[in-house]
Image (tube, helix red, strand yellow):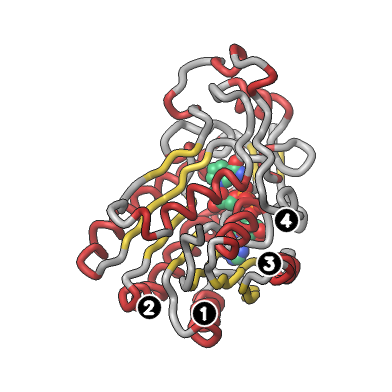
């Protein structure tokens, strides 16, 4: 089943992690994909591996929180593929863990720019094209937008903003035939949730697994599966949804993950070849402040 056959999609932050998986999933479902990321992200490599199995993709590097780069990505979709059906606002950062009194103001500013401004600017410029195709927007929310996230309160705040933003866009744009939804992951197996590749320490890592009833991280592909559904015509009556894919953490209380046996903690194998799942923070400065 090719659920996105003939659709044209932009996926921001698609060189690594969840975005890489979404780009592959969409290409496998028949979409033509504009793959965005910073110029130092492995965007070209994602495009090349999509093309290896006959998928259609083009790279568009740049910082989508900047108007000129956001416009360039949208123009790339129009120039290459003549239209835009789907915008995935996936780009985001998780740069520091620190209690709020110690949280650096420059990291706060950067987090808001990367997580909020990028989604707003891309949405603003994409909407006229999405209105023409009766397309849709899918954004990266998070369980951290529902639950209190200690030691990165600004990040949790950006996801609460994203949830409200998407609900507003959904209400406002329905009259143009445009839908807008969020996928809301729990702890996903990317750079962010490992002490070796991001600012979480061993204790945070342990807590996030214990608080999750399924007692494991989700895979980028498990999130891409939800995103593909939301972006597809199968979700034609879904708008303004905050779609949790979080192993149950949002509805849980306490360390329930401890009860889940090891054999049920295995991640599914998946079908996508993902080479850059844990490289999202490789070229970024991160901080663990205690
Ligand atoms: N990993 C998790 O546990 C988790 C949980 C909930 C939500 N999310 C959300 O999922 C999304 C992807 O997270 P991930 O874990 O795959 O992280 P990641 O770091 O692997 O991927 C994010 C990508 O976006 C790029 N990016 C960031 N800002 C950009 C900008 N302004 N312009 C262009 N590219 C930009 C980064 O360079 C990176 O390649 C984020 O929005 C995040 O908030 C992740």
Task: Measure the C-alpha gap from mark 1 to mark 4.
Answer: 28 Å
Task: Measure the C-alpha gap from mark 2 to mark 3.
Answer: 25 Å
Q: Earlier in the sequence, mark 1 or mark 3?
A: 3
Mark 3 highlights which residue? 50
Label 1: few (<14), some (14–19) or many (≥20) C-alpha neighbours in 10 Å:
many
Where residue 112 appears, as percent x and y from the top left, is: 51, 55
Where residue 236 appears, as percent x and y from the top left, is: 31, 57
Contact between labelled residues 3 and 4, with CB atoms less than 8 Å apart:
no
Mark nearest the camera among 4 and 3 is: 3
- Callout 4: SS: loop
Q: Earlier in the sequence, mark 4 or mark 3?
A: 3
Mark 1 highlights which residue? 77
Contact between labelled residues 3 and 1, with CB atoms less than 8 Å apart:
no
Where residue 120 appears, as percent x and y from the top left, is: 42, 64
Mark nearest the camera among 1 and 3 is: 3
Mark 4 highlights which residue? 284
């Amino acid at each position: 089943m090719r659920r996105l056959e003939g659709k044209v999609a932009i996926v921001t932050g698609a060189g690594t992690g969840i975005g890489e998986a979404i780009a592959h999933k969409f290409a496998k479902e028949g979409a033509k994909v504009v793959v965005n990321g910073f110029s130092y992200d492995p965007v070209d490599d994602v495009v090349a591996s999509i093309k290896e199995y006959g998928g259609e993709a083009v790279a568009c590097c740049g910082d989508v929180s900047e108007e000129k780069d956001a416009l360039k990505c949208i123009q790339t979709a129009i120039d290459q593929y003549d239209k835009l059906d789907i915008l995935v606002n996936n780009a985001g950062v998780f740069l520091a863990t620190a209690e709020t009194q110690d949280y650096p103001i420059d990291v706060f500013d950067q987090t808001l720019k990367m997580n909020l401004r990028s989604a707003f600017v891309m949405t603003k410029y994409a909407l006229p094209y999405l209105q023409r195709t009766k397309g849709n927007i899918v954004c990266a929310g998070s369980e951290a937008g529902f639950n209190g996230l200690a030691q990165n309160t600004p990040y949790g705040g950006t996801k609460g903003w994203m949830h409200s933003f998407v609900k507003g866009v959904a209400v406002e744009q329905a009259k143009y035939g445009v839908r807008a939804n969020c996928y809301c992951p729990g702890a996903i197996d990317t750079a962010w949730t490992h002490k070796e590749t991001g600012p979480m320490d061993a204790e945070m890592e342990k807590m996030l697994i214990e608080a999750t009833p399924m007692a494991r991280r989700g895979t980028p592909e498990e999130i891409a599966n939800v995103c593909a559904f939301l972006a597809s015509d199968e979700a034609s009556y879904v708008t303004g949804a905050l779609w949790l894919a979080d192993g149950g953490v949002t509805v849980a209380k306490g360390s329930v993950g401890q009860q889940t046996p090891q054999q049920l903690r295995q991640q599914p194998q998946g079908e996508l070849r993902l080479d850059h799942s844990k490289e999202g923070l490789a070229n970024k400065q991160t901080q663990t402040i205690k």
